[in-house]
Amino acid sequence: MRKVQYGLVLAAGMLMVVVLLLAFQIPLHVVGNSFKAQDDFLNGWTDEAGNAVSLYHAFGKDATEKTFTRTIDGTYNNGRNLCLITHNIRFTVYLDDAQIYDYHPVLGGIYGKRYGEALHTIDLPTFSEVREIRIEAESLRSDGTSGCNEAWLADSHMFMRHIEESSALRLCFCVLAFAFGAMLFVIGCVEDRMRGEMMEAICLGAITMIVSAWIGSQTMTMRVLCPNPAMLRVLEYLALDVLPIPVLLFSASFTNRQGSRIVAAGVFLSALNTVLSIVLVLLGLIDYSDTLIFTHILIAAGVAVVIHFVVLSIRRREISRRKSTYIISAVSILGASGMLDMLRFYLHKGAGGNYSFLTAIGLIIFSTVLAVYEYRRVIEMQVRSSQAELMQTLAMEDALTKLGSRAAFVAYEKKLLERKDGFCLFVHFDVNNLKRVNDVYGHAEGDKHLIAAADVLRESFGENGHLFRVGGDEFYAILDGTACRADYIAGTKTLAKAQEAYNVRENPPVKLAIAHGMAEYDYAEQNPETAERLADSRMYEEKRRMKAAENA
């Protein structure tokens, strides 16, 4: 039944995930919009000199301001919008001479000198004739990459859906990876404060969060969801700036080289690079992209340090085989994919394109391997914890009688020392003639005699006191609470009846007889040993009386 319940809960959770993914990926079929098709508007423009141009990378390195014009037939336009994805340009759109759109973001400060990519859906008025559309644009870059990455004449809702579909799955995974990294990071921090030696989990969690945030910030779905593209750009660069720090600290912790000067120098340089980037950008002296080369060098150096330390540790057999299999494979795949994307970036000279695709694949594998590793590690920790709890239970429970052990008795005494007011009763019990039972009838019969004694004591004092077997044939009951004296009187009466009932029912070869002595312990005295000695003395007095009665 439990497996069925588990399966139903799992199926319900997976159903929600599947439906959510389908909501992003499968479009709703709509009938009735005759202009639902998208027309490419990236080409077919002319510049001031009458040359045919494309809005894609429309600016060369020799011009910062340009005007682009083209005609548009209103007969085929009704119901559609001019939809653009611009890349670091300020611009104004005119229909004939009437301004219909203006985009001049205020930059500087924390944003730097550029905003990255931005989406625009520009409403066009209804008209039936052929009219001229003009874009007056200013480039924010001088490397020839500014312009429009996409331009369409399309229904704005369909355009946005198309944009969301292009990267929704990648963003969903980034969100899941970020959540997994955050969970690993938090668990690592909590466990590190409690037990220490969890820096690896903290660093791996931080790496997962940083990489997933970097990839997610570049998705077009985030461009739709976030109203501030400039801040997404800041996130991209700062994520890369701080990435070497957890990478280096992970390599040091994983290979037990926390005192390495190489790691200390790398962490210092990465922190310095991050701080200087922010300060110089705030002062307006540079843009984030100007420090990208230094960031890439630090990331590459961090990966090289990881490889060096891991290879050295494997050669010296300083890390376990299973641990190295999981962690090294995960980090290697993520590092290799990141290096390949970095190489692609420089081969294309930073021109527009997706330079996080391979890293995204690497992140999927990285997170999956880490999830498997952490799952197995948690299972092992739970097994060890269960074993520790079992050992603790065995230590606190007498194996034969299932009463509290000597260790449990000592632990309970320590709790009593914390009390300042009131009192309790120590009752010391001893099973008579146990040695004779063992010597004459064997230890199996002796064990049976002790179990019977424990059952009788449990019946007599178990509901109102705490019972312990503190030695071979010695037991203790501690009765506390306001009614402990009455509980003791009632318990002794029950004890006499229970012994007699057992002897009649089982007819053991040696009658069960339990001697006892009681002493009162005042919590203000803070010395339970005095009460123990008194209870012990009184028990032996009764034991002598009982033996004398047997011999009479």
Image (cartoon, grey):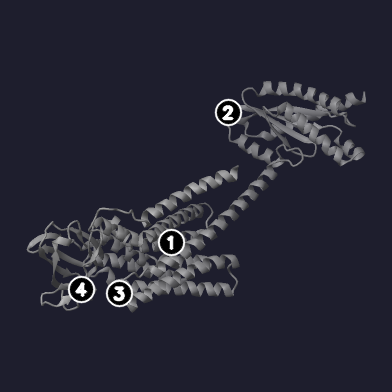
Q: Earlier in the sequence, mark 3 or mark 4?
A: 4
Amino acid on which the number 4 mark rests in the picture: Ser
The CA distance from mark 2 to mark 1 is 55 Å
Q: Would residue 311 appear left or right of 76 to someone viewing this image?
A: right
Q: Amino acid at mark 2?
A: Asp
479 and 288: which is toward the camera: 288
**Is 109 rendered above or below residue 502?**
below
Q: Are marks 3 and 4 in contact (CB under 8 Å)?
A: no
| Image mark for residue 208 | 1
Q: Position of residue 520 (x, y in %)?
A: 68, 27
Tell me the number on the disc at residue 350: 3
Amino acid carrying mark 1 in the image: Thr
C-alpha separation, residue under disc 3 versus residue under disc 4: 19 Å
Along the polypeptide, which appears first: circle 2 or circle 3? 3
Q: Residues within 10 Å of mark 1 (few under 14, many from 20)?
A: many
Residue 2 lies in what quarter of the image?
top right
Residue neighbourhood size for the residue with mark 3, other residues' Cα within 10 Å, grouped as few (<14), some (14–19), many (≥20): few
Mark 4 / mark 2, whichever is N-terminal: 4
Q: Position of residue 308 (x, y in %)?
A: 50, 75
Which amino acid is tagged 3?
Answer: Gly
Q: Nearer the viewer, mark 1 or mark 3?
A: 3
Would residue 279 be found to the left or right of residue 499 on screen? left
Residue hosting label 2: 421
